Image: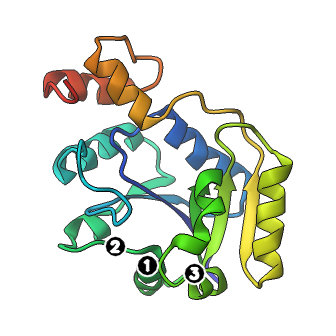
Amino acid sequence: MQKPIAVLGGTFNPIHNGHIKMAYASLLECDVSKVIFLPNGMPPHKDGEGILSSDHRFNMVKLAIEGEQRFELSDYEIKRDKPSYTVDTQRALKEIYNCPIYFIIGADSLYTLHLWKNPDVLIRECNFIVCDRKTGLGSDVKDAADKINDMGGSVKVLSMPRIDITSTELRNYIKTGKDVSDYLSANVYEYIKKNKLYL
């Protein structure tokens, strides 16, 4: 059987080094062949305010992952003209790649899976890799993962360093003129400055 792949979806507004750390942790700790970066087109859980155009976000992800053969960029959700839901996307990606799919999520998303579309189907059909980005490997995350696994789901919690930045914080830093070069790849930072984004 073909090795599974991992999918890291998100608004990527902008993509930052924390996202890349999550992808590398998934490669190191899970037996996946590659990580697919999947920028959202119309995120169903966000109102759209402050979200850059899909073109800008797609371009930034492309710049951030260039040169890493185990990373791939997908425009599947960006091409859709309506909100995309994980339960539907994972079925489509299974058809496209013909292999098991793992979705990389943060611990905050794990806690709210019951609010996602068709949560019972989602838990039954989706495999999840969870990155506890804020606190490291905590008991709350493990307990939430165990609960879903007991319900017939598949959740693997990664041990990884704390990620000290969010996209929201980055946007605020850029707006106020703070240097954010430590949090972004150099080519993404140059793209943001060149296109005067988030000002």
Task: Please give the name of the residue rendered at 39% of the width and 27% of the height, measured from the top-left corner.
Answer: 170
Which quarter of the image is occupied by the C terminus? top left
Q: Secondary structure at mark 2?
A: loop
Q: Is residue 164 left or right of residue 186?
A: right
Q: Is residue 93 above or below residue 74?
A: below
Task: Please give the name of the residue rendered at 39% of the width and 40% of the height, measured from the top-left corner.
Answer: 15
Q: Which mark is residue 10?
A: none
Residue 90 rendering spot, x and y as whole percentages: 48, 78
Task: From the image, tell me which residue sits under label 3.
Answer: 119
- Cα–Cα span, label 2 and label 1: 12 Å
Task: Please give the name of the residue rendered at 20% of the width and 21% of the height, measured from the top-left corner.
Answer: 193
Residue 27 visible in image: no
Q: Secondary structure at mark 3?
A: helix
Among the two numbered marks 3 and 1 on one chain, the one whose residue lies closer to the N terminus: 1
How many numbered discs? 3
The quadrant holding residue 83 is: bottom left
Task: Please give the name of the residue rendered at 34% of the width and 73% of the height, measured from the top-left corner.
Answer: 84
Q: Secondary structure at mark 1?
A: helix
Mark 2, Cα crowd under 10 Å, few <14 / some 14-19 / many 20+, is: some
- Cα–Cα span, label 3 and label 1: 18 Å
Task: From the image, tell me which residue sits under label 2.
Answer: 84
86, 95: nearer the viewer: 86
40, 141: nearer the viewer: 141
Q: Amino acid at mark 3?
A: Pro
The quadrant holding residue 129 is: bottom right
Q: Which mark is residue 93?
A: 1
